[in-house]
Amino acid sequence: MLQRMQTLWLLLAALFSFFTLRFPVYTGNKLVDGISQYNILSATSSLFLIVLAVATGLIALITVFLYKNRGLQQKLSLISLVLFLISGALYYAQIKSFSEGDFTLWSVFYFLIPVCLILAMRGIYRDQKLIKSIDRLR
């Protein structure tokens, strides 16, 4: 299980997803009643963002242990990627409400989640391809 590269990618994706709960992705000023207030945007800023971050991380973590069922593993990785895209849309909507601000250094963790998921899906696909080629030889 741990010798497969996609296991490491899935563990990293889960870890980065859980990091978004703790570390801010965006910081800046919001105008509230004409007064500029400093705000921090992280996954804990909204209930939907919390649910999506935890779901993305848990699905990636559960997928690690489904190494015998590669088809289900690939589907769950795709679901995790879709949840990431939905959370990206929610982050974008939240960021639009800021009058000024910048992405933090910790936002790198957030942007590495889809990279890890895509690399894991690629590894799962290669495993499926290898198993099919071995089955043809029998």
Image (cartoon, rainbow, N blue to C red):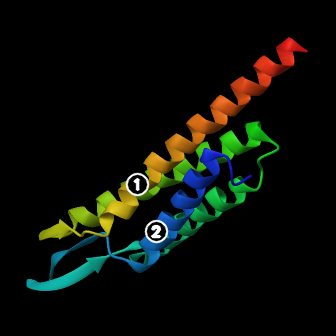
Quick one: label 2, few (<14), some, or many (20+) residues within 10 Å?
many
Element class at badge 1 = helix
- The residue sitting at 32% across, 61% down in the picture is 108
Q: Which of the two labelled residues, at mark 1 and mark 2, occupies the earlier sequence position? A: 2
35 and 85: which is toward the camera: 85
- The residue sitting at 70% across, 32% down in the picture is 127
Where residue 20 appears, as percent x and y from the top left, is 43, 71
For badge 2, the amino acid type reads: Leu
Horizontal side of 22 relative to 58 (left or right) equals left
Where residue 89 appears, as percent x and y from the top left, is 38, 54
88 and 137: which is toward the camera: 137
Element class at badge 2 = helix
Residue 67, compared with residue 37, is above or below; it is: above
Residue 29, quarter of picture: bottom left
- The residue sitting at 60% across, 46% down in the picture is 5
Q: Are marks 1 and 2 in contact (CB under 8 Å)?
A: no
- Residue, disc 2: 49
For badge 1, the amino acid type reads: Leu
Q: Quadrant of the C terminus?
A: top right
Quick one: label 1, few (<14), some, or many (20+) residues within 10 Å?
some
Camera sees residue 33 = no
Q: Residue furthest right?
A: 138
- Residue, disc 1: 112
Where residue 68 appears, as percent x and y from the top left, is 82, 44
